[in-house]
Amino acid sequence: MKNNSLHLITLLACISFCQVSAQPTGSVASAEKLISRINLSARGLEKVKEFSDQPAQASRLLLDYYRSRTFVKHPVDRRMRAKSLGNGASPDEIRTADNAMKHIFTGQSAYPPYFCGEDINWGTRPVPDNEWVWQLNRMNFWNAMASAYWHTGDEKYAKEWCAQLVDWTIKNPNDKEHSYAWRSIETGIRGNRWTALFQYFLDSPHFTPEVLVAFLNSCYDHAEFLMTKYSSKSNWGLMEAEGMAFIALIFPEMKNSDKWLTEAVRRLNNEIDLQVYPDGQQRELAMGYHLGCIEWFIRTYDLAFTNGKTDFFPASYVTKVQKMCEVPMKLCHPDGTNAQFGDGWAGRAGQHRKKFQEWAERFRREDFLFLATAGKEGRRPDSTAYALPYSGLYSMRSSWDQDAICMVLKCGPDGGGHCQPDNGTFELSAGGRNLMPDAGSYIYSGDPVNRNWFRQTKIHQTLTLNGSNSKYAPKQLLWKPGIHNDLLVVENKSYDNLTHRRSVFFVDKRFFVLVDEAIGSAVGDVALHFQLAPGKAIFDPKSWRVTSDFSDGYNVMVETTAQKGLEMEEEEGQVSFLYTKKEPRPAFSYRIKKTADQGNVRLITLVVPYENQTPKINVTVVGNTEIGGSKLQLEIDENGKKQFIGYTL
């Protein structure tokens, strides 16, 4: 008996030793660190405080506290887990989650998923584009794993997520070697997303005290790091503030949460004034970032409001967000796609309807409801022409029908790294077809040759001098929308001693007359560039005309008035509708030499969307008006029917 008892004691001791040895290295120290970061005087933490000198027990009690805590609210409601069975994830999310289970991850989504090793290498770079590794460390696939977990109820997703979370925190200390994971933008994005993941996985038996310790310590480190980073006047600054605010609001038990929240809200209140023009447009002048900024501004507001922090934002904050929500209504094409100015992407038809529905309910806006329901409900917007004079963005459309003719034009200030030197450029759509899309941007990093090619002035629908890139120096001279005709006159001091003035006449809400004037003492090769949608085009140099050649629906005719010294030249044309994807398209220019003797230059161009037959329209200048002067009058002859349009500045 004594020997058996001795063996039993020895066996139990060995088991105990093995269990202790199996604990993650440094787990006790990590638990001690976490407990030191918690305000143990907060309500509900009495038991945790009682065992604060026993970190392992304290972390177990802290996990019990979070599982039973109800006074903190998050958009992801743990009570909805049961209702998500069978309808919590899409097939794409299930596929992404199953890949992630095998460490096959998606970084930048334009590239295929990639195996990052049995022992995950979070710095994997399968392509030269840094966007891949940066976005790998945003862990979009973790969101898919969360959705798959609630959809299926299968604990394998929770088990693997917990393992990957701990793995990431161990392998990615915030140091120079791991800077790919700790850009402030990725840190802010994780700060927001991880609070949702916490809601999804908290109740899993695989979410152990050790996982909680790793998770909360990393959240604390995220917030502390974000306190040192403030990218003012950039969308980065909003994501930094949002990440810090979400951690502060969802984990108010952390000692520095009040400090984080106060600073995050201060930044958001500051940035909405610095980044949003009075006309509602975000300063970077790219629609995708504008829409993102709406979310980054409003999500923290909503989370604070839901958790009783109603006095953190002034009423003007929400008013400015509502103004931002008007911008896609005013500037998107009739099918809901975006103009691809700067680092913008067209997207898909009807893509904003869900957002307009949300905004219609939030702001009680009948015009937003009209767009959300494709005109079936609500009230159509109050105009068919809009000017955003501070941001230099304009739209003119024939109606609010889905097949309306619409031009969106840009002549604005420098919007920073996501902007392009393209003032004067435009997009034209008709019949649901974008006939003259902007080139887009193709890629962000890893391919500077193509990145720079897509940022050239000469690949936009605007004027150049000697083919060089223009400056940002915009000015609105006249904006005069009307019942029958719309009129816009803008200028950009594009080069030293050369200003480009573009006058746009939307005649009978059917076609456009462009008057482009190169004004100033600079000399050289003046070129007026145009690009069409991908497809065939008919070039007719004798008539100075180019037409698209679609077999059905709308086409477009571009035709410039002949003058001495004018030349027409085909150019390289490319357009990118998806990241890392590009395709050829027709492109051309009208060129004329500007000499010291010749003085200023004027080019008059018809841009006519049409169905069936090519239209016959002639435009002539009435009188001997000075190029770049304060007056201009044109005679328009369409099949013998004449009308006169013009302006006095």
Image (cartoon, rainbow, N blue to C red):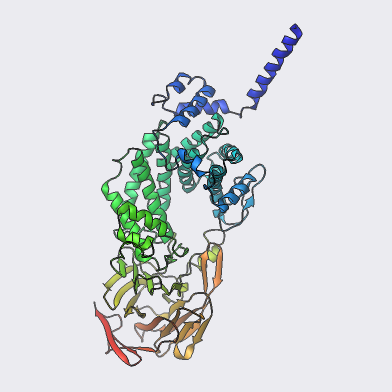
Residue at x 50%, y 67% (from the top left corner) = 454
Which quadrant would residue 482 be assigned to in this image?
bottom left
For this orientation, the residue located farthest to the left is 648
Residue at x 34%, y 65% (from the top left corner) = 330
Which quadrant would residue 450 be assigned to in this image?
bottom right
Which quadrant would residue 390 be assigned to in this image?
bottom left
Residue 423 is left or right of residue 311, and the answer is: right
Q: Is residue 264 visible?
A: yes
The x, y position of residue 340, in whole percent, is 44, 66
The x, y position of residue 315, in whole percent, is 26, 48
Residue 439 is left or right of residue 373, and the answer is: right
Residue at x 72%, y 10% (from the top left corner) = 5
Q: Is residue 432 above or below residue 13?
A: below
Please name whichever residue, 40 or 452, is drawn nearer the observer in this view of the structure.
40
The x, y position of residue 456, in whole percent, is 47, 69
For this orientation, the residue located farthest to the bottom is 640
Q: Quadrant of the C terminus?
A: bottom left
**Number of marks present in the image shown:** 0
Q: Is residue 632 visible?
A: no
Please name whichever residue, 95 or 528, is drawn nearer the observer in this view of the structure.
95
Q: Is residue 153 above or below residue 44?
A: below
The x, y position of residue 150, in whole percent, is 53, 42
Residue at x 36%, y 64% (from the top left corner) = 376
Q: Quadrant of the N terminus?
A: top right
